[in-house]
């Protein structure tokens, strides 16, 4: 859930529609559920159109924003802040998705803002 929170935060920060990313778990025994998840997500992404379309971002600007996001997520400061945050959440046995999202966003706000500049 920590990765979900981080990815959605970065997507919002660079102006991407969060519906373009969805991480769901399905065991090998859940083939029908897996097919349903993939089918729904594929339809959703198709409806959103090409990357940047629904967001109103030109392809050149989208490339710049994606490059910034990749650079930001590659910085030692952001990676360390994320690792420290997720370790703390695991240590405290935090399982509530909302709490995880709020914690990740709060702890990474400054380092992500600085890295995305």
Image (cartoon, rainbow, N blue to C red):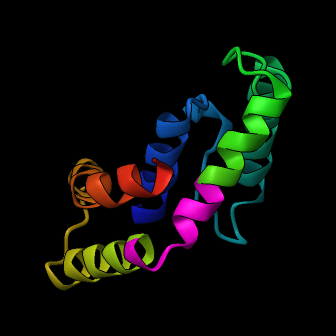
Q: Give the total number of marks visible in the rendering.
A: 0
Residue 65 percent coordinates (x, y): 66, 41
Examine the rendered structure and indicate whether residue 33 appears above or below residue 19. Answer: below
Q: Residue at x 45, y 58 (%)?
A: 115
Left or right of residue 107, residue 56 in this image: right
> Compared with residue 50, is residue 115 higher up or lower down, i.e. above or below?
below
By secondary structure, the bulk of the magenta-drawn segment is best described as helix
Can you see residue 4? yes
Residue 37 lies, with reference to residue 26, above or below; the image says above
Task: Work out which quarter of the rendered image holds the N terminus and state it.
Answer: bottom left
Taking the image as drawn, is residue 51 in sight? Answer: no
Q: Is residue 79 magenta?
A: no
Residue at (21% x, 53% y) in the render: 106
In the rendered image, residue 47, in percent from the top left (x then y), is placed at: 80, 18
Of residue 61 and residue 42, the one placed in the foreground of this image is 61
In the image, 87 versus 108, the foreground residue is 108
Judged left or right of residue 49, residue 19 is left
Q: In x, y percent, where is residue 89? A: 22, 74
Q: Nearer the viewer, residue 30 or 92?
A: 92
Whether residue 26 sits left or right of residue 115 in the image: it is right
Q: Which residues are magenta?
A: 69-77
Quarter of image, res 107:
bottom left
Residue found 69% across the figure and 61% down from its top: 30
Residue at the far left in the pictured view: 92
Q: Residue at x 74, y 53 (%)?
A: 34
Q: Position of residue 68 (x, y in %)?
A: 62, 51
8 over 18 or under it: above or below: below
């Amino acid at each position: 859930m920590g990765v979900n929170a981080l990815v959605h935060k970065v997507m919002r920060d660079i102006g991407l529609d969060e519906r373009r990313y969805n991480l769901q778990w399905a065991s090998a025994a859940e083939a029908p559920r897996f097919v349903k998840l993939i089918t729904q997500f594929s339809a959703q992404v198709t409806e959103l159109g090409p990357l940047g379309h629904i967001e109103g971002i030109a392809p050149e600007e989208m490339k710049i924003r994606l490059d910034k996001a990749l650079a930001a997520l590659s910085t030692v400061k952001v990676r360390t802040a994320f690792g420290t945050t997720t370790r703390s959440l695991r240590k405290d046995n935090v399982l509530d998705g909302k709490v995880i999202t709020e914690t990740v966003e709060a702890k990474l706000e400054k380092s992500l803002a600085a890295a995305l500049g």
